[in-house]
Image: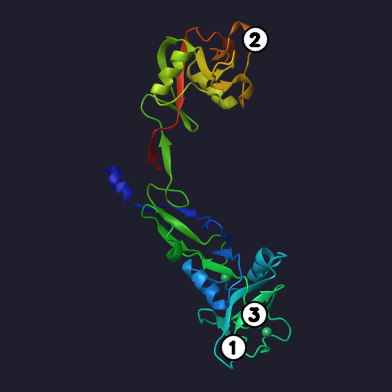
Amino acid sequence: MINSFLTIVLVLMVTRLQAACPEGWIYWSRSCYYKSNQAECHGSAVAFCKKFNATLVNINSKEENEFVYKTFVSNPTFRRTYIGVVRKSCNNDTFVTSEGKPQRYFNWETGQPNNLDTQEDCVEMRQKKWNNINCGYMLPYVCESKLTCETTNPCKNGGRCVDLPHESTAAYQCICRYPFSGTHCDLRRKVCDKGWIAFRNHCYRSFPGVRPWTVAGMVCRRAGGDLPVVQLEEENAFLRQTFPNLNLWLGITECLCGKKCSVDFDKVIYSNWDTCEPKDLDEAKGCAMLKKGTGNWKNRDCGEKHNVVCKREPSRQIAVA
Ligand SMILES: [Ca+2]
Ligand SMILES: [Ca+2]
């Protein structure tokens, strides 16, 4: 009842989106940009961009001109590009966007636009400045796809998308329904099953009784986890404090006599060996144990019987409150 009530309560989390562009496209200020690999006439360039719901790059500020120049046109193999500006009509010196909308920013070279080639109705950027050019000219080009709520529809689980003001660093925000969160309203908190204890992003559980190392490992794998490979000092302290009366097998072994091993003693990212340990490796004491009380590690004969605490990933997820 409470849950069903809560799920219809709107808007507890407002999360700023980091805009994401498709692979191969570059994000800048609420748009995704793509650089073509080959030269095309103007019509083919427009058609290519259109396939991706994009247009030839529509440059409407000094900053965007600078971005396009630096990112795409300053490259030695790519010093020119078509941009999304065209002559409005024949014998008219008004230039508009490729979609026929008013163009307010221009960065013409001195003496441009002209009509050297009788009909120069399209526009290129060359070395940061603009030049009008015949539309049949084969040139590389840059496509631009503006990120808006309408074009990307990024919010999951009933979240509402709001376009942000143009000067914002992000393109839009998702306003999530309770109890979802995250940039796309797709985050839920992970939790441990009953009987398992959560620490950071993992769950731990003690299985009563003492067992040899290999049997202990089997118990853990049957429970969907494995013997713990401790990765942090805090995790070691957690095990020592949570299971104060148990000597715990750890999921690391020395690779002795060519035997298969789990995580080699030498390859752990964290260790807490007792003074002078590991020792007597030649006596096949190839398994690691976390000693009760101190939390220090000792290497022991794998056939000895010690306590079993298993570690595993959370199995369930619930929504974040
Ligand atoms: Ca633009
Ligand atoms: Ca010209």
Q: Is residue 233 visible?
A: yes
Could you say which is closer to the camera, residue 252 or residue 183? 252
Q: Is residue 68 left or right of residue 260?
A: right
Three-letter amino acid code of the residue under disc 1: Thr
Image-quarter location of ligand 2: bottom right
Determine whether 135 is above or below 183 in the image.
below
Q: Which mark is residue 94?
A: 1
Residue at image position (61%, 89%) is: 119
Q: Earlier in the sequence, mark 1 or mark 2?
A: 1
Q: Which quadrant would residue 79 be assigned to in this image?
A: bottom right
The residue that disc 2 covers is 279
Looking at this rendering, what residue extends furthest in the left direction? Answer: 1
Do callouts 3 and 1 mark residues in contact (Cβ within 8 Å)? no
Q: Secondary structure at mark 1?
A: loop
The residue that disc 3 covers is 106
In the picture, which quadrant includes the C terminus? Answer: top left
Q: CA distance from mark 3 to mark 1?
A: 11 Å
Q: Is residue 320 left or right of residue 78?
A: left
In the picture, which quadrant includes the N terminus? Answer: top left
Determine whether 312 is above or below 106 in the image.
above
Do callouts 1 and 2 mark residues in contact (Cβ within 8 Å)? no
Query: Residue 29: percent from the left, percent from the top?
Result: 58, 64
Three-letter amino acid code of the residue under disc 3: Phe
Label 2 CA crowd tier, 10 Å (few <14, some 14–19, many 20+):
some
Q: Is mark 2 within 8 Å of ligand 1?
A: no
Residue at image position (44%, 25%) is: 225
Label 3 CA crowd tier, 10 Å (few <14, some 14–19, many 20+):
some
Residue at image position (46%, 25%) is: 311
Determine whether 231 is above or below 299 in the image.
below
Could you say which is closer to the camera, residue 211 or residue 157? 211
Determine whether 158 is above or below 121 in the image.
above
Three-letter amino acid code of the residue under disc 2: Lys
